[in-house]
Amino acid sequence: MRDGATFHLDLDRPTLIYLTDIPSTGGKGTMSLPAFHAHTVRQLLSHTGCVADYPDKTVPGIADRTTHYATAMSAVRDIWNVGLVTKMSDAGFPEDAPNDGACIMGKTWSYSTPAFIFVAAVLESVTGRAIHRLLQEEIFAPHGLSSMRMKYAASTLPPNDNRASLYDDDNKKVDPANNSWRAFGGGMETDVVDLARFGWKVLDGWILSPEARDNRLWRRVDTIDPGPDYALGWGVPHDTDRGRIAEHPGMSTGGRSLLRIYRDHGLVIAILSNRKNHPVDDVVTLAERIGDRVPR
């Protein structure tokens, strides 16, 4: 790390190796990740770990939370007793290809936002830093991403004159909810310039080496179900006309985002919206129209 400290994280080791003997809530005794969580960190990042998503997406499901969590570790302790999925998520699949059948760890793709909470907790465990501090000290500040931050690093949202108001699908203003429990699953905020800058720094090898970026981060994960083209936290579709793409979308009530990178053309497209759904010209359509201007 930037202060000279070192740590070792093996993506192919079981997650429970990193989440064992964790101080319990209240500081009395320790707790460990239940043994049925036999997934690896890589499987969490690639959505092949059979971790539950929200109740309307998988069975069982993990309900959204608005309690403030100071660390990812405290959040993951509240969700890790939910069993692995018995009905997988259809997210990312074509309408004519439902994701039926049994979830097989490491082999089938089932999207899970809470899987990222486990990843954040693992990073806290191996570095000894709260996730908001780790991100600020290792990525945001060093790379000049001044607007990028964990939204609820504290229990209240700090005022910001540049923060857009949030709207539901009926164009009614909605209040932001404390989503500190999912730091890596929609718990950050940024302006669109810094989002694009982040994408460029990944593409240009500033944040990860080109070797790690291409052979780890953006390397497609093979699955036995017809899952989408997915790598570690990124979609990696291939456009016949415009070549290789890396992208990451996000959505929640009052917000929608898309970071799309045309890898072979050096083009980074970042789009932020302050409502979740758009019946006409959604953010994906807008990104595709911008991409249409890329020389073939």
Image (tube, helix red, strand yellow):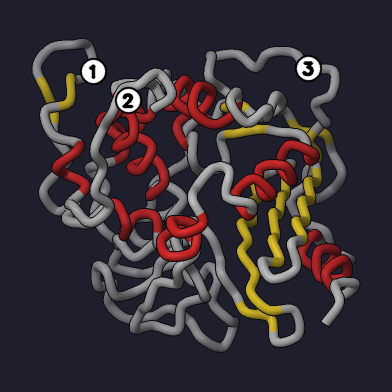
Residues marked 1 and 2 touching at CB (< 8 Å): yes
For label 2, count other residues whose C-alpha is less than 10 Å away and answer few (under 14), some (14-19) or many (20+): some
Q: Amino acid at mark 2?
A: Ser
In this picture, is 261 found above or below 18?
Answer: below
Query: Residue 18: percent from the left, percent from the top?
Result: 19, 38
The reply, left or right, for residue 76 in relation to residue 288 is left
Residue 233 appears left or right of 189: left
Tell me which label, 3 or 2, sits earlier in the chain: 2
> Between disc 1 and disc 3, whose residue precedes?
1
Q: Which mark is residue 74?
A: 2
Q: Check the picture and name the quadrant holding the N terminus.
A: top left
Check disc 3 and report its element: helix, strand or loop.
Answer: loop
Q: Is residue 159 left or right of residue 84?
A: right
Task: Report helix, strand or loop for mark 1.
Answer: loop
Q: Amino acid at mark 1?
A: Thr
32 versus 13 height, above or below? above
Could you give the CA–CA distance between mark 1 and mark 3, rounded to whole angstroms?
32 Å
Q: Nearer the viewer, mark 3 or mark 2?
A: 3
How far across and down, in percent of the image, does residue 187 sit?
Answer: 56, 35
Which residue in the structure is indicated by mark 1?
Answer: 25
Q: Residue at x 70, y 33 (%)?
A: 190
Residue where numbered disc 3 is placed: 160
Inspect the image, locate mark 3, and give the three-letter code of the amino acid beneath it. Answer: Asn
